[in-house]
Image (spheres, grey):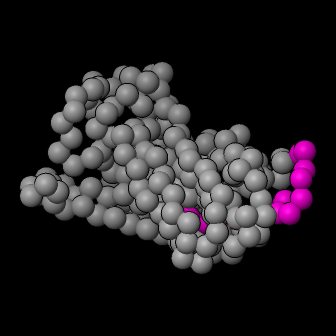
Amino acid sequence: MILNRVYTFIEETLSEGGRELKRPLKRVAVAAVIENPFAGRYAEDLSELMDIGAELGQLLGQQAVAKLDGDAPHSYGKAAIVGMNGEREHAAALMHPKLGAPLREAVNGGKAIIPSAKKMGGPGTMIDVPLHHKDAMKVRSHFDAMEVRIPDAPAANEIVVIVAVTNGGRPHARVGGLLLENIQGEDGLN
């Protein structure tokens, strides 16, 4: 893997809707800008990107969780932006087969699927990293997203890979659904 840059984005919400939070909500995204080894050419075998995905799951997952400053991770998500000389399938190869296991290890759990988004674009392309609870995806208070944009990436031959984690759900959530205290955490749904 040729890793060009790593970016860290931290959003800390102290108040929302005119009401102070009991505890600040921290959302963290860590993004890696890598060279795309398949830029400009079609390849049937994308296993090299799958292996890079495992490396990035560990690197980005550990760095994101560390930025929660000791708080337990509640939610997670992943996303990728492929430069214009690549394919969306390159993002899929990075994110789906092998990135998940090391990310789940970093968040100490992860029974639920890891929501993801992928797109193609050039430098400055924005992407919303989808988020939901790591162990029970039906916890509506944790349905959210974090916007990430890197001004100078991805270049045509690069891919931006992003992992995001939070220490809680949306501030003042009140739309019903499965509550945190009722999570069973066995099947990834409830």
Give the quadrant of the C terminus.
top left
For the residue pair 159 and 133, the one nearer the viewer reads as 159
Magenta segment boundaries in residue numbering = 30-45
Residue 4, relative to residue 115: is it above or below?
below
Task: Answer with left or right where residue 17 lies relative to residue 70.
Answer: left
Instruction: Give the residue displayed 73% in from the left and 64% down from the top.
Output: 84
Q: Position of residue 163 (x, y in %)?
A: 53, 55
Q: Is residue 61 visible?
A: no
Residue 134, relative to residue 51: is it above or below?
above
Task: Answer with left or right where residue 3 lies relative to residue 111.
Answer: right
Instruction: Give the residue displayed 9% in from the left and 55% down from the top.
Output: 19
Q: Is residue 183 visible?
A: yes
Q: Main secondary structure of the magenta part?
A: loop
Q: Position of residue 2 (x, y in %)?
A: 76, 70
Question: Image quadrant of residue 183?
Answer: top left
Residue 121, relative to residue 155: is it above or below?
above
